[in-house]
């Protein structure tokens, strides 16, 4: 069994990860523009429940979506300036993942051992890329400047080559490819695997793409999903 939803509390089972469920390499976790400054959002990679948040300084963070106190989902929390506060008992964590405030013990300097499980998180190509804290490889180097277009949920995971067969592609990494459809604007397609929940596909376009390009790409994207799910 994976995550257990209990009013926002997360079962300790979510911490058990293995090669099938761990975050391997750099994986897209969402479009960069979906997390505004001082905002928080839930995401998922394979079976890993994540909280994505951005401070007032503009830096994006990816953590395990579980408060180290009693397991409340941190995605229910609030961001003020550059700190995330858990909704349940108000423990507050700074950008390094360390707890610096416990409201029930206002005079306590929380020990450094109270910290969240952190992932590496970078922005590139209009996407947020997440990797295990110990990932040694560099983040994907996305060529050019890209702007987020849209994300779509797919009911099952589909390998990128199967999804875009017949279209000229240029691989960026295992989860993302540049698409070069004939007579259409170039696209960057990125896959976020979510295990039994299927997957999210994120689409970005060159920053100089027109509004009509975005509409065109969006319609193409939806048609591909229909084709893919009908073929399943
Ligand atoms: S569960 Fe987060 S502060 Fe208590």
Image: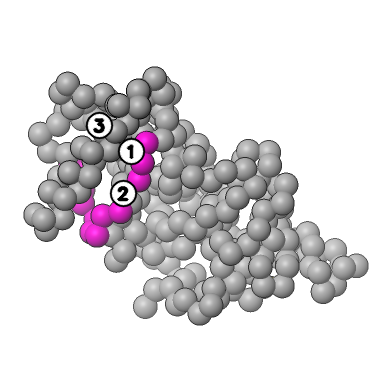
Percent from the top left, x then y, of residue 118? 57, 55
Q: Which mark is residue 203?
A: 1
- Front residue of 8/21: it is 8
Per the image, label 2 sits on a secondary structure element best described as: strand
The answer, for residue 229, to whether it is visible in the render is yes
**Residue at the spot x=12%, y=38% of the render?**
165
The region drawn magenta spans: 149-161
**Residue at the spot x=49%, y=45% of the render?**
34
Q: Nearer the viewer, mark 2 or mark 3?
A: 3
Mark toward the start of the polypeptide (1 vs 2):
2
Badge 1: how crowded within 10 Å, few (<14), some, or many (20+)?
many
Q: Which mark is residue 216?
A: 3
**Residue at the spot x=30%, y=26% of the render?**
212
Per the image, label 3 sits on a secondary structure element best described as: helix
User: Magenta includes 67?
Assistant: no
Residue 23 vertical position relative to residue 113 in the rendered view, above or below: above
Mark toward the start of the polypeptide (2 vs 3):
2
Q: Which mark is residue 152?
A: 2
Percent from the top left, x then y, of residue 100? 78, 59
């Amino acid at each position: 069994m994976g995550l257990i939803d209990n009013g926002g509390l997360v079962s300790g089972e979510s911490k058990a990860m293995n090669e099938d469920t761990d975050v391997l390499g750099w994986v897209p976790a969402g479009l960069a523009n979906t997390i505004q400054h001082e905002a928080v959002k839930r995401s998922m990679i394979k079976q890993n429940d994540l909280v994505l948040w951005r401070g007032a300084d503009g830096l994006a963070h990816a953590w395990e979506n579980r408060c180290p106190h009693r397991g409340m989902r941190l995605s229910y929390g609030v961001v003020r300036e550059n700190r995330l506060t858990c909704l349940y008992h108000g423990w507050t964590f700074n950008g390094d993942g360390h707890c610096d405030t416990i409201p029930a013990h206002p005079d306590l300097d929380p020990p450094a051992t109270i910290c969240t499980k952190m992932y590496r998180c970078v922005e590139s190509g209009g996407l947020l890329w997440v990797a295990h804290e110990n990932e040694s490889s560099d983040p994907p180097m996305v060529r050019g400047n890209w702007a987020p277009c849209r994300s779509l949920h797919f009911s099952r995971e589909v390998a990128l080559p199967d999804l875009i067969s017949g279209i000229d592609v240029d691989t960026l990494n295992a989860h993302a490819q540049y698409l070069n459809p004939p007579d259409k604007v170039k696209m960057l397609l990125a896959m976020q695997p979510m295990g039994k929940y299927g997957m999210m596909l994120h689409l970005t376009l060159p920053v100089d793409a027109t509004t009509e390009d975005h509409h065109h790409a969006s319609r193409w994207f939806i048609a591909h999903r229909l084709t893919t799910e009908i073929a399943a």
